[in-house]
Image (cartoon, rainbow, N blue to C red):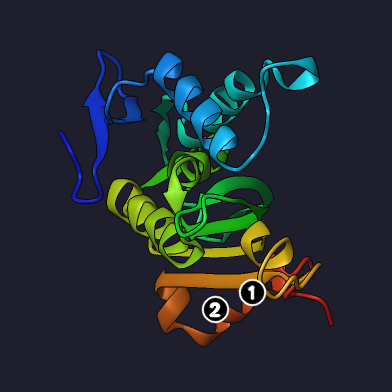
Amino acid sequence: MQSPNGVEVLPTVTAALRVGRQGPRRDLAAAERAAAAFLSALGVDCDSGSLVETPGRMARAYAELLTPREFRLTTFDNDEQYDELVMARAIPIRSVCEHHFLPFVGVAHVGYLPGERILGLSKLARVVELFAHGPQVQERLTKQIADWLATHLHPKGVGVVIEAEHMCMTLRGVRAAGATTITSTLLGTLRDDARSRGEFFALANGGSSRAG
């Protein structure tokens, strides 16, 4: 079974789902040759010294950045009828800007209001990684994470906030070192209900909506 965003969800013999992304087969040898040609075209001599292994390192590094790991999506019956916000804060993000193929790094804050199922907490980080590994723009990444959780978990609401620093903006062009970009997507109750929305953003910012 394949969802509209191209992510494959494969049923296993258990209640969990094995989740991965289909794509062309990797050819690291070809990538290494291409990296060597790319560096040579820019005037970098990789034939001697410490640069001899650089094309191979480049190929392996980008393969790691572009390839998410498969995981099993584990959900559980919400036996206690828990109806408060569940959030994982500061999930690390490493992705690649599709415009310049330079990395952007940061954190994601992901939360949801449970329905009939609750999610294994580590899986929130796994879903973030699933969509972060590949050519991306931050706006799309934020929405993909939220939409996927809404589709596969059927919660009452989903919220995603991403804060990231883009190397294409801090190392080149405007060279705005230290600047971060913040994007958010809210679905369901977290979008429609002001109190729930406020609680989500308060927790995403590291505070408590119940203080005072």
Q: Residue furthest bottom?
A: 194
Residue 201, numbered label: 1
User: Could you classify mark 2 by the number of other residues whose Cα lies within 10 Å: few (under 14), some (14-19), or many (20 or more)?
Assistant: some
- Pointers 1 and 2 in contact (CB under 8 A)? yes
The residue at the far right in this view is: 212
Q: Residue at x 51, y 46 (%)?
A: 128
Q: CA distance from mark 1 to mark 2?
A: 6 Å
Position of 16 relative to 168 (above/below): above
- On the image, the x and y values in percent for residue 9 come to 25, 32
Q: Determine whether the residue tagged by mark 1 lies in a helix, strand or loop.
A: helix
- Give me the residue at 37% from left, 18% from top: 27
Residue 152 higher or lower than 99, as above or below:
above
Quarter of the image where one finds residue 54: top right
Corner quadrant of residue 188? bottom left
Q: Nearer the viewer, residue 66 or 55?
A: 55
Which label is found at residue 197? Answer: 2
Q: Quadrant of the N terminus?
A: top left
Total labels drawn: 2
